[in-house]
Every structure is written in C-alpha cells, then in structure tokens.
Image (spheres, rainbow, N blue to C red):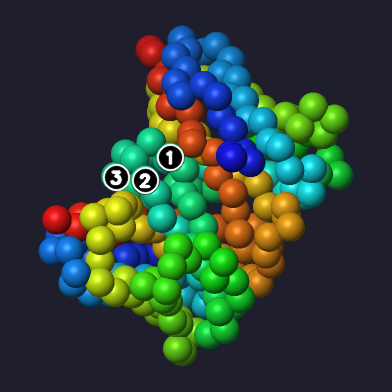
Amino acid sequence: GAGVSQSPRYKVTKRGQDVALRCDPISGHVSLYWYRQALGQGPEFLTYFNYEAQQDKSGLPNDRFSAERPEGSISTLTIQRTEQRDSAMYRCASSPRAGSYEQYFGPGTRLTVT
Amino acid sequence: DQQVKQNSPSLSVQEGRISILNCDYTNSMFDYFLWYKKYPAEGPTFLISISSIKDKNEDGRFTVFLNKSAKHLSLHIVPSQPGDSAVYFCAASGGGGSQGNLIFGKGTKLSVKP
C-alpha cells in the first residue's frame, strides 16, 4: 500500500519567502508528526496531531513555523519569512493509533534557503 | 544537551558476524525505546522497540537489550547481512514530553562487508 508521501521533495527558496510543505499520511492513520533533520543528526521533533487536533507544538523553533491538519488527513507545515538556518530535511511521519510509538516516515522535503 | 546519544558514528562488520549498535540516554523518565533503520534517500523505517519494563526483545535476527540502571540499550544483529548496511537511529519516548515526541540519537552508519 501507499506509504507517507511528501511534496515537494526538494524546495529552493530565497530568504524572506514563505514556504508550505505538504504531508500525505498513510490512509486512516490517526497521528501525524513533523520532524526536522539536519545533516548528520537524527530527526528533531517539531509538532504532532491526533486527527485534526494539534497535540504538541513544543518543538516548533519560533512563531514563523506553523502547522495545520484541518481535516485530519493531509497536513501542511508553513515557514514564513524563511531564513538560511531553516535549511534542512523536513520529515513527516504517521502512526495508525493515537499514542502508538511506531511512526512511519515519509521520504522528506529537502528545503534550501538561499 | 543530547538526551539520546549514539557515540559511534560508524561501524563496519563482516557478513555473518554480529553487529552491535549502542545507545545511551540521560532521561530516566523515558519509558519506550525504538530503533529505526534508514537507507539513503528514504525516510527512517521502524525496526524494533522495547518497553522500559522489559530488558530484552527479539525479532528474528534483531534483538534489543535494555539496561535501565546503566541507561543503555543496544541492538544486536545476528548474522549480519550486506542488506543491513544503513544508518541506525535510536529513539526514546516518554521523557516528560508528549507521547508523540520521539527523541532521536544522531545515528550510527553500519557497513556490512561481504
């Protein structure tokens, strides 16, 4: 079956522009997570949702970052006024049940801010 | 300060031998631990997990050992195969954060030579 998909796979943007990264979880999965991964590091938690409700956004670095999942399926991570330090791989994951520790990751979106 | 540490960035093992990947953690509140495997250009995939109430979990060639007093866990792969070559991430949950918030180590790159 289809896994977690993310689009775009690569995004190059100029500093100061807004970007929107999309995640399409595995169909029927309740929970959706966003992570950021720098080169040579493990994924770093940003935020997660159960259905459409944002459960924890403690990992979002600042108020330029926001996420939504309005219908409990697809999610968008938005970064406003991008800065060079925002350049990273942004990964989305989903899990079938709320509270399930096992998360299924997508291929990621490589964001480069020039 | 990193709460989950994988101190070996890389490990090389001969095919057929045992691979041992190590992970240390600092937060005694962690109650669930996972190992993820990542191939190039793909997202991490769940491999095996262990609850803090156990000290061993086995799944085929993969066994995870947990030593709570030492705050240490390890992943054993026996026998190692060339297809096991990947980056392995240790992750932990429950350390005072929300259940969806996995804390990852930096990863260990395993190379299994034929």
- Mark 3: few/some/many CA within 10 Å (<14, 14-19, 20+): few
**C-alpha separation, residue under disc 1 versus residue under disc 3:** 15 Å
What amino acid is at disc 3? Ala
Name the element at disc 1. loop
Q: Which mark, residue B41?
A: 3
**Mark 2 touching mark 1, by CB under 8 A?**
yes
Identify the secondary structure beneath mark 2. Answer: loop
Q: Is residue B100 left or right of residue A40?
A: right
Residue placed most toward the observer, B64 or B79 = B64
Q: Mark yes or no: residue A90 visible.
A: yes
Are both tags, 3 and 2, on one chain? no
The numbered mark 1 sits on a residue in which chain? A
Mark 2–mark 1 Cα distance, whole angstroms, equals 5 Å
Q: Quadrant of residue B6?
A: top right
Q: Amino acid at mark 1?
A: Gln
Report if the CB atoms under discs 1 and 3 are less than 8 Å apart.
Answer: no
Residue at the spot of label 2: A38
Are there few (<14), some (14-19), or many (20+) residues within 10 Å of tag 1? few
Residue drawn at point x = 56 percent, y = 19 percent? B19
- Residue A61, given in percent of the width and then of the height, sits at 45, 63
Vertical order, A30 against B77 (above or below): below
Dot 1 corresponds to which residue? A41
User: The disc labelled 2 sits on which kind of residue?
Assistant: Ala
Q: Position of residue B63 (x, y in %)?
A: 68, 30
